[in-house]
Amino acid sequence: MPHPPRRNHPRRRTADVHELAANMPEQLSAAVHLAVWSGLRASELFALDRSRVDLDAGSLRVDRSQIVIRGKFHGYGPPKSDAGNRVVHIPPHVVAMLRDHIRDHTRPGRAALIFARPDTGGPIVDPVRTRAFAKARAAIGRPELRWHDLRHSGATLAAHAGATPRELQHRFGHATAAAASIYQHATAQRDRELAHRMAGYAAEPPPVSRPSTTRNAGAADAHHWQRVRSALRRHNSAGDGWQICGNGTPRRR
């Protein structure tokens, strides 16, 4: 039986995200996904309003940040540094989640906050978010998680996807390339491990893993396996030795 992905494996990270989001209050579920896949700081994410979200372009304009002192909201200010002023693009599956959230939970008007208190439409401040997140992380058995870990996971996933230090610096609003390089170091180690694993397949076509059975694997996994199956169907016509089973998973002929 194959071992489940390790905690720091990208698929394990995204599975944790789905489980966390599922255990958050409905009006904050999409915020968990957006925190990971956009990499916005909490103060930036909860400062977004309709005028700063372009669903057609799949982008977020980050130019302000919540000012919260001792749990009390004191308005908005600039991002943490000049590098924090940026436009961030998000993956299509997160655009779809955000579109649904805005339809169901965001009030009308360009100044309406994307994530707001359901009773007043006012800003969600740290204590409210922290209490909800504490319950969600306890529900999935991850009491050590912090909200900031969502941003950290997003940076690591971006590095796994091949982002350069410069791209990481822009996307996550880092003031220096040194901050972005933290995630590059982690990826370099993963790439070395990957190279060693790939060497074992040099004599035969690499096997295709079965789909993840992790609960709530989500849209990203589904899209990935749809692409895998489509590719294998094309390859089947060339007689390369693979076939699609009745349950939709690939195997050698």
Image (spheres, grey):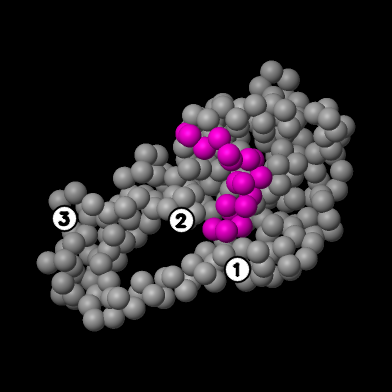
Whether residue 13 sits left or right of residue 123 in the image: it is: left
| Relative to 252, 15 lies left or right | right
Residue at the farthest front position:
144
Marks 3 and 2: CB-CB under 8 Å? no
Q: Are marks 1 and 3 in contact (CB under 8 Å)?
A: no
Judging from the image, what secondary structure is the residue with disc 3 in? loop
Q: Is residue 209 above or below residue 148?
A: below
Measured in 3D between alpha carbons, the distance from the residue under mark 1 to the one under mark 3, in whole angstroms, is 39 Å
Badge 1 amino acid: His
Residue identified by numbered label 2 = 9
Q: Which residue is mark 3?
A: 245
For the record, the magenta segment spans 140-157
Name the residue tied to disc 1. Answer: 185
Q: Which label's residue is closer to the chain start, 3 or 2?
A: 2
Residue 125 in sight in this render: yes
Left or right: where 32 falls relative to 172: left
Q: Mark 3 to mark 2: distance in Å? A: 27 Å
Q: Residue at x 74, y 44 (%)?
A: 44
Marks 1 and 2, how far apart at CA? 15 Å
Label 2 packing within 10 angstroms: few (<14), some (14-19), many (20+):
some
* x, y percent for residue 126: 73, 32
**Which dot, 3 or 2, sits closer to the camera?**
2
N-terminal of the two: label 1 or label 3? 1
Q: Earlier in the sequence, mark 1 or mark 2?
A: 2
Q: Is residue 18 above or below residue 138?
A: below
Q: Residue furthest top?
A: 119
